[in-house]
């Protein structure tokens, strides 16, 4: 003997389909971002970085250093892991 479940409402079916579409679209956006990152190539080496910085300065770019946000030390759990 099998126990049958009541049919889901049309709204529930539509919501489930919409959620599946959104998951698929999100996965496609992630895959596209990964492909763009791989096609960009390797990060610049030191010579390229120096050339890019020199070009930036030649066009009148300036570098400023911001003051620390506060004099309080950053707790170890908040520091980025290197």
Image (spheres, grey):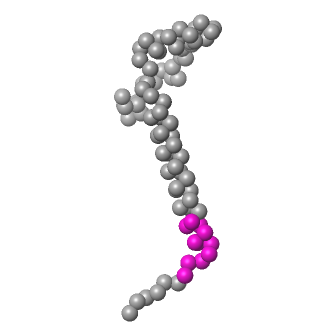
Q: Tell me, yes or no, if residue 75 can be seen here.
A: no
Residue nearer the viewer, 61 or 71: 61
Question: How many discs mark residues in the rendered view?
Answer: 0
Q: Is residue 33 magenta?
A: no
Q: Is residue 24 above or below residue 67?
A: below
Q: The N terminus appears in which quarter of the rendering?
A: bottom left
Q: Position of residue 53 (x, y in %)?
A: 52, 12
Residue extending furthest toward the bottom? 1
Q: Is residue 9 magenta?
A: yes
Residue extending furthest toward the front? 39
Q: Which residues are magenta?
A: 7-17
Q: Tell me, yes or no, if residue 35 can be seen here.
A: yes
Residue extending furthest toward the top? 58
Q: Is residue 16 above or below residue 42?
A: below
The residue lying at 40 percent from left, 30 percent from top is: 79
Q: Position of residue 13 (x, y in %)?
A: 58, 72
Left or right? Give the position of 42 relative to 23.
Answer: left
Q: Is residue 69 above or below residue 81?
A: above
Residue nearer the viewer, 69 or 58: 58
Q: Position of residue 45 (x, y in %)?
A: 41, 17
Q: Quadrant of residue 42?
A: top left
Q: The C terminus appears in which quarter of the rendering?
A: top left
């Amino acid at each position: 003997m099998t126990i049958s479940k009541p049919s889901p409402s049309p709204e529930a079916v539509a919501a489930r389909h919409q959620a599946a579409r959104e998951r698929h679209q999100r996965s496609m956006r992630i895959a596209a971002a990964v492909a763009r990152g791989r096609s960009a190539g390797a990060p610049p080496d030191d010579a390229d970085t120096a050339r890019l910085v020199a070009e930036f300065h030649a066009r009148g770019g300036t570098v400023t250093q911001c003051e620390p946000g506060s004099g309080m030390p950053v707790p170890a759990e908040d520091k980025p892991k290197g």
